[in-house]
Amino acid sequence: MREDNDRNSSLPGLAHAEDLIPVAGGGLLHRRVFLRRGAALAAGVASGAALAAADSASPADGTLTTPPWMRKPGLPFSNYGRPSEHEQVVRWISANPAVPGNGISWTPLHELEGTITPSGLHFERHHNGVPQIDPADHRLLIHGMVKQPLKYTVKDLARYPMRSDLIFIECGGNSNAGWREEPAPQPAGFIHGLASCSEWTGVPLSILLEEAGIDPAATWMIAEGADAIAHVMSLPVEKAMNDCILALYQNGEKIRPENGYPLRLVAPGWEGVLNVKWLRRLELTDRPVMSRNETSRYTELLPSGKARQFTFWIDAKSVIMAPTHGMTMPGTGYYEVSGLAWSGRGRVTRVEVSADGGKSWADAALQEPVLPRCFTRFRMGWHWDGAPAILKSRATDETGYVQPERDALLAERGRNGYFHYNAIVAWEVSADGRVTHVYA
Ligand SMILES: Nc1nc2c(c(=O)[nH]1)N[C@H]1C(S)=C(S)[C@@H](COP(=O)(O)O)O[C@H]1N2
Ligand SMILES: [Mo]
C-alpha cells in the first residue's frame, strides 16, 4: 500500500482536481485517479522526502552516497533465480501432524501484487503428501465407456496441440473461517489464500477424449491421481469436453511437484478438488464415483435438510488485500485500497468498495486485462481522515451475480457450512490506525 509520509497531510491540489472529489462516504476517491497520471500528481500522491533531508543513503547536499554494492562487481550468474534475501514471503503451512501429508499451505495473497501467483507460492492442498513421480514411469490411461482405451506417456502428451489459460484455482474450503462465530484474527492470505492464479498450459482434454471416442451413453468422467490416496473425483463429460486442460506447464515451466507434476487436470472455474493432480486415469462412465470428497466433503447440509452436492462452480468473491488485518496505518492521508476479485462463472464486471461499512459504495478501477476465471486486481483511492472506518469490497460477475453480505449467506445456507464461503469481507480501521478483521 502506498501512503503519505506526512502525518495529517491534506492533499495539495485536491480542490482543483475533479477526479479527487470523494465519491462515497469515508473518503473514497474517484477511480479515475488511477487512470490519469496527472490527477495522481495533482493529489500529491508522491511521497518522496524533501531534498534537504539527509539520511543514510544521501547527504544533505542533494547527492547520493555510493553504496557498497556499487564498489565491486556483483554475484555471478545463477542457474535458477530466487527472490531477494531481503524478501521473506512464504506460504503459511497448517498441516495435521497426526495425518502425514494431509493439510494445506496458504498463498500469502496480502503480500503479493498483480494477479499471477509465483509458482513457489501457489497454495497447496494434499490429502496424502506430494508423490515423487518419475515422469518416465508415469502413464495416463483413458478407458471405460470409450471406443478404444488409450494409454499415453508424458512425452506422447507433449506432442499434442496445446493452449494456455490464465486460470485461478480455489479450494472449496477456502475462506471457511467465515463460518465461525468470531472473525479469524488473520491477514487476508491466511483466511482466503487457498486460491492462486497461474498460467496453465497443456493439451485440451477434448482432443484426447475424441481420440478415444466417447460412448454417447457416458455422462461422467472419473479422474484419478497417482498419489498414495489415489484421489478420485467425478466430472460431467460435458465439462470435460468443454474447457478442461491436461496441464503440463505452470507459469511457463513444468508444473511444480506440489501442484501436480507431471500432469494435472485443470477444470476452469470449478472448485479446486476437481483439479486432480498427478493425473493417471480418466474413466468414462454413466454415473459419478461417489468418493469421499463428493459426498462427506465439499458438500453442505442446508437448513431444509437437503445437502448441496456437485456444486462445482466457484461463485464470485473479492477480498481487499491492502490494507489487511494486523497492519497499522502509518498516518492519515492518501492510500490505495487494493485487492483481488474472481468468479468461476466468467469475468468480474464490477467491484465496489465501501469505507463506511457498506452504507455507501463506489466503483473500484478494474486493472486490465480482465479475463474470465482469472484473478482481477481492483484499486480504489482513499483519503483516510483518521476517523474509524470499515472497509469492504463487493464483486459482481458477468452473470449478474453479486457477492453476498455475510448475513445473507448464513440465512441461505444455515450454520452447518464448512465449504464454499464467499461473503463480503470487512476490515475495521480504528482511530489509532490498527486494522482488524470484523463481521460488520
Ligand atoms: N491427486 C490429488 N489431486 C488433488 C488433491 C489431492 O490431494 N490429490 N487435492 C485437491 C484439492 S482439495 C485442491 S483444493 C487442489 C489443490 O491444488 P494445489 O495443491 O495445486 O493448490 O488439488 C486437488 N487435487
Ligand atoms: Mo480443496
Image (spheres, rainbow, N blue to C red):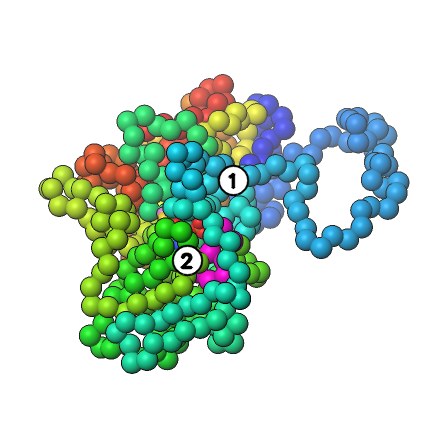
Numbered tag placed on residue 91 in the rendering: 1
Q: Residues within 10 Å of mark 1 (few under 14, many from 20)?
A: many
Q: Is residue 201 above or below residue 351?
A: below
Q: Is residue 344 above or below residue 123?
A: below
Is residue 295 something that shows in the picture?
A: yes
Question: Can you give x and y, in whole percent of width and height, for residue 228 in the image?
Answer: 40, 51
Question: Can you give x and y, in whole percent of width and height, for residue 317 in the image?
Answer: 36, 46
Image point (20%, 74%), residue name: 217
Name the residue carrying label 2. Answer: 226
Range of residues picked out in magenta: 257-264
Numbered tag placed on residue 369 in the rendering: none
Query: Foreground residue, 107 or 152?
Result: 152
Q: Residues within 10 Å of mark 2 (few under 14, many from 20)?
A: many
Does residue 414 belong to the magenta stretch? no
Is residue 199 something that shows in the picture?
A: no
Query: Foreground residue, 94 or 251?
Result: 94
Residue 143's image quarter? Answer: bottom left
Query: Foreground residue, 429 or 291?
Result: 291
Q: Amino acid at mark 1?
A: Arg
User: How many badges with numbers are in the image?
Assistant: 2
Query: Foreground residue, 185 or 138?
Result: 138
Image point (39%, 34%), residue name: 98
Q: Amino acid at mark 2?
A: Ala
Question: Can you give x and y, in whole percent of width and height, for residue 190 in the image?
Answer: 44, 36
